[in-house]
Image (cartoon, helix red, strand yellow):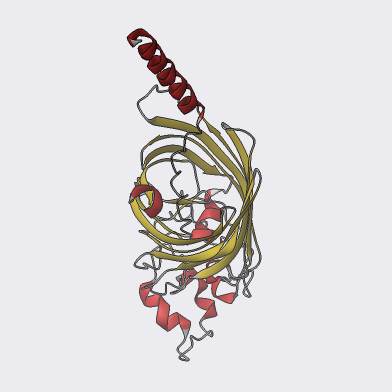
Amino acid sequence: MKTGALLATALAMISGSALAADLPVKAAKAPPPAAFDPWDIAFGSAIMNDYIFRGVTQSNHKPSVAAYFEPRYNVTKDLQLYVGLSGESISFTNRPAAEIDIYGGIRPTFGAFAFDIGVWGYLYPGGTCYYGAANAFNGGLTDSAGRPLSAECLANAVPNANTMKKDVSFVEVYGKVNYTINDSFSVGATEFYSPNFLNSGAWGNYASITGKYTAPSTVFGSSGVGMYVSGEFGRQWFGTTDSFYGTATFPNGIHYADYYTWNIGIGFTYKVFTLDLRYSDTDLNKGNCSVFTGAFNASVGTSPITGINPGGNSSNWCGAAGIVKLSADLTAVTNLK
């Protein structure tokens, strides 16, 4: 009897275990998906040995610092609205305090295509009028207060007689597109237009093509260092300036020389930092460069005299340059959470 009872009990335990194994197991409750936060802020700063803009130095080939602040609103994962404020240290003939940029736009993405469309304002506060002696024949012109321009500006004339208005602020509208071919390669195009480039009275149009190669993350092992190679080839076109920049041959204004510009460089990234080493150049000769930039240190009489360069001034502000730039770029969502 005892043996039979033990056998029955064992069979019952085995049967109960089998039934329990067949019962459905209640899955652990998955955590709710993270809430979509549409707001973000990008910001950063940079230091460089030369501030080059479309092939032309803005800092007299001297070091420059820059910083920016850009709030963003992501309508969806493929549509972003943004505004921004940035500043760079510069060295212009009219001696403004800095370049201050105010901009905003929209960045839609369609598959591998990323667009950026917006408006960019370049402000140069604190400038002083410089009116070269070579243009003193325009002394009949007056400023907004009715004072002769020659009297207002000649007191600030530079030895080479180059010319620049007190305020050269201007606005551009722009469009950019970037196409991602794969994880390593991307190509793009840009278009910028201003009805009054550098407040000169001349319209300006800039277009370029771009390319970038990003090395695989395994190139530097597990160090976290990334690398890329990028380049750009563009052309800047101009209209005719107002009479402030006129010459004896063209008293009503001059047509700035159109030019090509290009750059190529290699960059290294680590966390939020980027070190970019770049070569930049243009096909502007030194005489046309002097006219376009109004460089305060242009040499006199070393370039051929032309209709837009009656003094034969020569400037190296538009020539070949090497750029070393160290920057840090962060976003609130990625780096501050």
51 and 75: which is toward the camera: 75
Which residue: 63% across, 70% down? 195
Q: Position of residue 175 (x, y in %)?
A: 63, 57
Outermost residue toward the bottom in this view? 146
Q: Position of residue 91 (x, y in %)?
A: 37, 59
Q: Position of residue 177 (x, y in %)?
A: 64, 50
Q: Position of residue 190 (x, y in %)?
A: 62, 52
Which residue: 48% across, 35% down? 265
312 and 197: which is toward the camera: 197
Snapshot quadrant of residue 194: bottom right
> Is residue 22 shown to the viewer in this render?
yes
Question: Where does the N terminus fall, quadrant-wise?
Answer: top left
Q: Above or below — where is 13 with respect to 39?
A: above
Which residue: 61% across, 33% down? 182
Q: Above or below — where is 173 with respect to 189?
A: below
Q: Above or below — where is 81 with respect to 332?
A: below
204 and 191: which is toward the camera: 191
> Is residue 258 shown to the viewer in this render?
no
Looking at the image, residue 207 sits to the left or right of residue 157; the answer is right
Number of dots carrying numbers: 0
Outermost residue toward the top in this view? 3
Q: Above or below — where is 130 with respect to 24?
A: below
